[in-house]
Image (cartoon, rainbow, N blue to C red):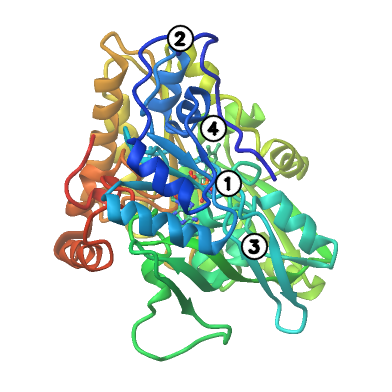
Amino acid sequence: MTKPSMPNEYPSASFARDVPEPAPTALLDDLRRAGLACETSSEVRSDHGRDWWPLSIADVAVGRVPHWPGVVVLPRSVDEVSELLRVASAHRMPVTAQGGRSGVLGGAVAPDGAIALDLTQLDKVLSLDEVSGHVRVQAGVFGPELETYLNARGWTVGHFPQSFDLATVGGWIACRGAGQLSNRYGKIEDIVRALTIVLANGDVIDVGSHAPRQAVGPDLMSLFVGSEGTLGVIVEATLVARRQARFEQRAAYGFPSFEEGLEACRRILQRDASPAVLRLYDETETQRNFELDTCALIVLDEGEESFVHATMHIVVEECANATVLDEALVERWMAHRNDVGALAPLWERGIVVDTIEVSGSWANLPAMYNHVVDALKSMQGMLVASVHQSHAYVDGACLYFTFAARPEEDATPFYRRAWDLATRAVLANGGALSHHHGVGRNRARFVENALGSSFAILVAMKAELDPFNILNPGVLGIGGAPW
Ligand SMILES: Cc1cc2nc3c(=O)[nH]c(=O)nc-3n(C[C@H](O)[C@H](O)[C@H](O)COP(=O)(O)OP(=O)(O)OC[C@H]3O[C@@H](n4cnc5c(N)ncnc54)[C@H](O)[C@@H]3O)c2cc1C
């Protein structure tokens, strides 16, 4: 079993005093009577009261527990998850599903007094259909375990988020995530075929199908992809696996401006070339990552040799006016692509830092890029606001902004305003609120505006599936924003 890796640790002896009471005895008795493993120690509860949201990191650095769940429950089977939700329903007690707790928006933080449902004991790869390429897996399996199992048999699911080592399959699906090679392998919604879900009342349902597609009414499985623990608990998933790639090719280019690089990406995608990696960095991020004065585009494709050659041929043609850079830049990116250690030390030094990933159409991206960066740079104390393009489509792309500041005011209101300004600029330019991190608590206040007239459908689905509002209340902005 892999234990979640957290960004920082509480200073020692943080909880000598002021530890809130655990969950009520009547609830604990019922949970234990149902045979569930429960933890109520201050160490385990405080650990499950935080995730990778930067404000959690800031709290932990000064020994403050963001939230104190009343109890941490670690089920070992689907039946135990079902039992847990029956008991929680009877007690009207909120439950937050937790995988690796690598969420960066506060969505995996169990509220004060609530049940933290740690799914990491559901850690088995169950089966591989080597004819169809379907792998059945429990929700608490981490990326490395899944890929080790598959690679040993010549397969991969190709889902490699930067948080590959930190996150679980259930979390990938619950957050509607995207891996770094997603232009080739698809986003998680392209990879998932079927799910087993435990509903708030403890009922176990299957959604999706082991057939490649179905036209049997609306796609009910997609309700749960991106539902962030608010509509049901994902306990098992069937994912599409691919044969491991046998061939790979790399290239790197420099563009005089980010906009010109975006244009090249658009032309490449619109000629139906979709290299696994097509990442474009602005001047600031190119300097930070590669010490070069340009906007670097790094390209990597893998798969069947003839397809890779065809794809890279189009890349070469569309980058004909760019400067050819050393393809060793791609190796450099590969070597550091899963480094995750930078965030916490910066917060501990008083730097307010975060990333904001969004998406937009090619027509809107240049204006969105400029407006977001300008809005962030207009803030007193902002040190840097930069961007890269990380996932490209035939009609648009994901922009991934990074900001860092040393504000004169308190960090929290500054941080909140930075998000307000950037999000306003994204939505005003027709962008999507999030491309792959999701909503959590941090973005909950924007969801009603972002979804517009369809927000009522989300609220209605929640009321139907979770009438007592016990599943991760406050997340996704349903019933108001907690922050
Ligand atoms: C350094 C870093 C880099 C990252 N890079 C990427 C990236 O490249 N691509 C990307 O997509 N994301 C990225 N993320 C964000 C995060 O890793 C993903 O959202 C990930 O999918 C979360 O998985 P988890 O198991 O850690 O879920 P958690 O953080 O534990 O939970 C996240 C949300 O999902 C819900 N949830 C978790 N498991 C279940 C379940 N089984 N059933 C129902 N709900 C559940 C939780 O309630 C919560 O709302 C990154 C995060 C970090 C810290």
> Which comes sooner in the sequence, label 1 or label 4?
1
Q: Nearer the viewer, mark 1 or mark 4?
A: 1
> What is the number of the mark on residue 285?
4
Q: Residue at x 34, y 83 (%)?
A: 218
Q: Quadrant of the C terminus?
A: top left
Q: Residue at x 52, y 64 (%)?
A: 79
Question: Mark 1 vs ligand 1: CB under 8 Å?
Answer: yes
**Label 4 packing within 10 angstroms: few (<14), some (14-19), many (20+):** many
Q: Quadrant of the N terminus?
A: top right
Q: Nearer the viewer, mark 3 or mark 2?
A: 2
**Label 1 packing within 10 angstroms: few (<14), some (14-19), many (20+):** many
> Which comes sooner in the sequence, label 4 or label 3?
3
What is the three-letter code of the residue carrying label 2? Ala
**Where residue 20 sits in the image (x, y, percent)?**
34, 22
What is the three-letter code of the residue carrying label 3? Pro
Quadrant of the image occupied by residue 246: bottom right
Which residue is under mark 2?
A: 16
> Which comes sooner in the sequence, label 3 or label 2?
2
Q: Is residue 361 above or below residue 239?
A: above
Which residue is under mark 1?
A: 167
Which residue is under mark 3?
A: 275
- Callout 1–callout 2 Cβ contact below 8 Å: no
- Callout 4–callout 3 Cβ contact below 8 Å: no
